[in-house]
Amino acid sequence: MRAVFSVGKVRVDKEIIQKKALKLGISVTVCSVLMGCQSVPDTDALGNTRYQTSTQPSNKRNLDKQEIARVRTALAAQYIRENKLDAAQQQLEKAFAADSRYAPAYDMMGVLLQQEGSAINLAKADEYFKKAIALDKDFEQARNNYGVYLSQMKRYSEAAAQFEIAGAALGYDGRIGALENLGRTYLQLNNKAAATKAFIRAMEGNRSSLIAHIELVDLLIEQNRILQAQQLYDETLQLVQDKNSPRLLLQGIKLAAAQKDMVSRQKLSQQLLSAYPLSDEAKKLKGWLANPATATWR
């Protein structure tokens, strides 16, 4: 199962990152990330002249420290997208130094360690996700990302619990993705009734959810609800603008076979075998053609 992690809370426009970083005295790092110019050491993190007497309110320093942590975390997210993991690590360490209680930095470190993928770093990632949630129990992004991690570790029941929380958080911009992840996790637990409900919830929140469409087509076919499956399949083809994939072709073959549409079945079978001969779907089709009475589709 491929679930999706989110960096939603630190998705900041590049120009905004640059302006914020300049204000906070970390312009060189932003320059090197966003514009590829040569890196030089950072200035004072708070941008203050040494020994200067401050007349700012007493809480200004704390606000600046949190803002530094936010920008550093945003930069780390950008580095992760570019697969520059060492640079991302450096930014997150600076985020922790600025504000040791900034939950998104711990979440992003978990994502970073998970993406690196070694056994040592995968073990460390667990604690960072837990820390992010402990610091902010309403941090839905961290719950979704922790669920993705738990799914990767095959701890599916724990993952489902995290996705349930994120998927129920109205207003969270990653809620639909969390519900898609939840449905896929329930499939791993062989709880197809719960998976169906999760995918329906995802579609209710966003009728264009492609993952929910594709998964529900298979679930409806298994339940022999062919007319509903066909309607949803036709809607899916509109979403992908008729760009076929092995899975969609196999679904079309199943539906054509169930409705005894031999012309469509043969046409789609030829497309699958010629365009994707080495795919798992082509192997399933060959098995079904060899022995349709006993072959299984999934």
Image (cartoon, grey):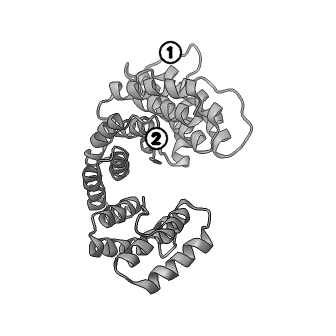
248 lies above or below 46: below
* Precedes in sequence: disc 1 or disc 2: 2
For marks 1 and 2, give the CA distance.
33 Å
Asked if marks 1 and 2 touch (Cβ < 8 Å), the reply is no
In this picture, residue 45 sits left or right of residue 130 = right
In front of the other: 163 or 26:
163
The amino acid type, in three-letter code, at marker 2 is: Val
Residue 150 at x, y = what percent?
Answer: 41, 35
Q: SS for tag 1?
A: loop
Q: Nearer the viewer, mark 1 or mark 2?
A: 2
Q: Residue at x 51, y 63 (%)?
A: 281
10 Å crowding of disc 1: few (<14), some (14-19), many (20+): few
Q: Which residue is mark 1?
A: 53
Q: Residue 152 in the image: x percent, y percent?
A: 47, 38
Q: Can you say which quadrant of the picture contains the C terminus?
A: bottom left
Residue 223 in the image: above or below residue 187: below
Element type at marker 2? helix
Residue at the image point whose x is 48% and y is 76% from the top? 242
The quarter of the displayed image where residue 214 is located: bottom left
**From what the image shows, is residue 277 above or below residue 26?**
below
Residue furthest to the top in view is: 51
Decide: few, some or many residues near mark 2? Use Cα within 10 Å; few <14, some 14-19, many ≥20.
many
Which is more toward the observer, 51 or 227? Answer: 227
Residue 56 shows in this picture: no
**Horizontal arrangement in the rendering, residue 222 relative to residue 286 (left or right):** left
Q: With 66 as the anchor, is 246 left or right in this view?
A: right
User: In which image quadrant can residue 50 be found?
Assistant: top right
Q: Which residue in the protein does label 2 denote?
A: 10
What is the residue that sits farthest to the right in this orientation? 38
The kind of residue on which mark 1 rests is Thr
